Image (cartoon, rainbow, N blue to C red):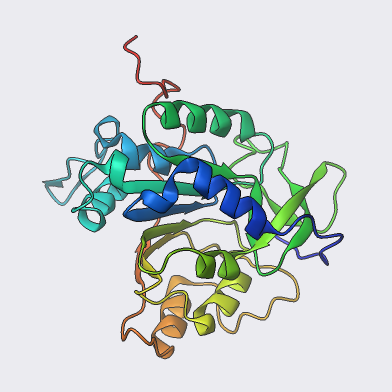
Amino acid sequence: MACRSPPSNPPRPWGWTLRTTVIQSGCPNASYLYLDIGSNIGVQVRKLFEPEKYPHRHHHHNHTHKHARAVQIFEKDYWDAVPRASNVCALGMEPNPHLWPRLQALEEAYNQRGFRTHFYRFAAWTEEGTMDFHADPGAEHHDWGAHLRLSSNDTVKVRTVDLIAFLSSLPRGKIRVMKLDIEGAEWQVLEKAIPSGVLCSDFVGRIMWEAHAWGTPNETWRGEHTRQAMLNRLHEHNCSSGEYSKVSEEDESYGMDMDENFGGAVR
């Protein structure tokens, strides 16, 4: 279960880090952004830039789809971003230190190929500071359920950022899709994000998210931990643009990914 602990000794403001890395990644020149909040091993970013590797695996009611759901969403929402490598920049957030080596390798290889990508080693939250991060070593895929919590014998301190402030700092209208998979912390984040207006279409075009059945102790979210409860709250908010962000379920296909051939070399 994700738990909130009071931020302690906030590090240098995230805005400084954001400005530096966004400039280095070339994102100011990109037409659009993709935000990968809770990147895990970076599969969704790979579906964005290498869609041909991720065909749809399932047949449903005699209908087949050429690509995985996320690939279909990217094709729809970034239809005019051609070529995608020069028109879209991917920014991810993943606090799990077990995954940093892979994400760093992916980032470096992708930027060499012209796929503008950057992963922040931050946890998405409602304020800036540090919190304990726990990955269950007893789970078969222990990194899949890693989460924020108060304390444990096997935790590490991770940096948290105010996701709402993060979104507000980015160019308005450029975020076509944002994935949000933060293992129960989404409810507290949504409680602050919805009334702030950042989940309106002029900020974020679409949210691709996973609704977890648990939340955080002492959270202020008003409602059940269900997708419908989130939609109800979102629909209640009056967006200045007149439309709220589209909502889609996260695509969890290819959880173990296809390969680690990030450089595109033929093997």
Question: Residue 40: x percent and y percent?
Answer: 54, 42
Foreground pick, 60 / 83? 83
Q: Position of residue 49 (x, y in %)?
A: 33, 38
Q: Please state the horizontal and vertical placement of residue 23, each as a whole percent of the image.
A: 51, 47
Q: Residue at position x 33%, y 42% from top?
A: 48
Image: 218 above or below 108 = below
How many marks the image carries: the answer is: 0
Question: Which quadrant of the figure contains the N terminus?
Answer: bottom right
- Which residue is drawn at the image coordinates 35% and 14% (left, top)? 265
Is the residue 143 above or below the residue 15 in the image?
above
**Would residue 33 appear left or right of 167 to someone viewing this image?**
left
Q: Is residue 222 left or right of residue 111?
A: right
Q: Which is more toward the observer, 63 or 28?
A: 28
Is 31 positioned to the left or the right of 163 in the image? left
Q: Residue at x 48, y 42 (%)?
A: 25
Q: Which residue appears at 34% of the width and 9% of the height?
A: 267
The residue most toward the top is: 267
